[in-house]
Structure formats: structure tokens, C-alpha cells
Image (cartoon, grey):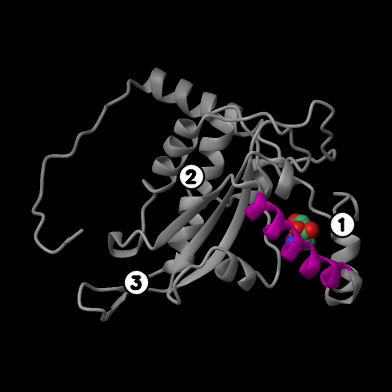
Amino acid sequence: MANSDLGFTPLAFTERSPETMHLRARQLFEELNERRTVREFSDRPVAKEVIEYLLQTASSAPSGAHKQPWTFCVISDPVMKAKIREAAEKEEYENYHGRMSDDWLVDLKKFGTDWEKPFLTTAPYLIVAFKKAYDIGPDGEREKNYYVNESVGLACGFLIAAIHHAGLVTVTHTPSPMNFLQQILKRPANERPFLLLPVGYPAEDAQVPVIERKGLGEVSVWFE
Ligand code: IYR
């Protein structure tokens, strides 16, 4: 999209009454506060159109100079999912058997994670978010992107919220290193894997660790 001379247009802004604003703020908190990271998936299918909307929501996130420096790869092909699982588990095996520090392993113990990642083949969809370190212009020249990590992080946040809102679950999976995703998915050199999100229904007997979220007093400082 050529973005140089788009001009300006009046803002489409929906004003909310104070009561409605209060209600909506509370309701969204209550809804998103119910989100849990889930590692046990069902193989129940999910409509492709739902995934399309989730990605459009993600892509509505703000980005540096509106460059939208992201590509989302969507994988439902079982052969490809198996390849990704095999490569991810190979890296994770090394992580859990020497590459991760003792402190890190202790911190993860309560989540029950290990090197095995069955969700990579069980979940009906894997979404891999790639960050575009730079863009390629029409004549093959490099075009700069800005705040790439922040932008793609925001888009992934929107995506995770959208997945929950739609009634599906995910886990923020960050196999490390994850260059294998660039190879398997044949992405160009300007794209680097950022985050892998399996998407689907939870397994019927899915369990999640007991956690508490920090209260407002622990995560905010007010200057009034
Ligand atoms: N990437 C590994 C390890 C891991 C790291 C953190 I920090 C977590 O919050 C959870 C897992 C894995 O996916 O198992």
C-alpha cells in the first residue's frame, strides 16, 4: 500500500456515556481476566473464517509509522504441523536438558512444562507471527520499519485477546532458537519468527496451573 499522501478524514469516534464507559471497561476486564494460557488442546476443527477475523483483528494493532511489520503464517496442514513439532521439540529438548538455567527451570516447574509439545500437532491451527525487520520496496530496495518488536508484540496481544473473545484458547509458545520456522515456512530473509500460537478448543480434561494475578496496587503507580 502506498502510504505517502493519504490525506486526513474526520475521526469516526463513538462517544460513550459515563455509565456505558464504566460498564464496558469493567466487562472487558472481566472477560480478558478469564483468559488462561492452555497447553492441552482438542483436535476439534475451527472454521477458517474465524481465524481470518482473528488475524484481521491482530493486524488492526498500531505499528511504527503504520508499517504493519508482520506476517502471520497459518498452518493447518498435518504434515507441516508434524515437521514444526519435530523441530520445536528438538530445540526444546536441548533447552530443558542444559540450555536453560537452574533458576529458569525452577521458575517453570509450577507450570508443568517440558520439552514435549503435543499441542503443535493437536491444535487445528498454528499461527506463527513473523516480524519484518525491513520491507522490500517495489524495486527490491530495503524500506525501513520502526519499533518492530513493539509493533508485532502489540499485534500479538490483540490476537491473543481476539482468540479468547472468540471462545478459543492458545499458548504463547516461543521455541528457542526458532529459525527453523523461517526454513520450514520458507519465509524471506527480512522476516524473523516472533511467536507461535496454537489455536483451538481446549482438551475436555484440560488443566491449568493455579495462579494469581498481581493486583492493581502492585502493577500501577499513580501521580494525582
Ligand atoms: N520455551 C519453553 C520454555 C518456557 C519458557 C517460559 I519464560 C515460559 O513461560 C514457558 C515455557 C517452552 O515452551 O516450554
Q: Earlier in the sequence, mark 3 or mark 1?
A: 1
Q: Are marks 3 and 2 in contact (CB under 8 Å)?
A: no
Secondary structure mostly seen in magenta is: helix
First in sequence: mark 2 or mark 1?
1
Amino acid carrying label 3: it is Asn
User: Could you say which disc has been placed on residue 145 in the image?
Assistant: 3
Q: Nearer the viewer, mark 2 or mark 1?
A: 1
- Foreground residue among 172 and 110: 172
Is the residue under label 1 in contact with that under label 2 (CB below 8 Å)? no
Q: Which residues are magenta?
A: 79-96
* Mark 1 Cβ inside 8 Å of ligand 1: yes
Q: Residue at x 23, y 33 (%)?
A: 13
Q: Is the CB of the residue bearing disc 3 within 8 angstroms of ligand 1?
A: no
Q: Who is closer to the viewer here, 210 or 1?
A: 1
Give residue 10's position: percent from left, percent from top.
12, 40
Residue, disc 2: 158
Residue sticking out furthest to the bottom:
141
Q: Is residue 153 above or below residue 54?
A: below
- Of the pair 170 and 27, the residue shown nearer to us: 170
Label 2 vs label 1: CA separation?
27 Å
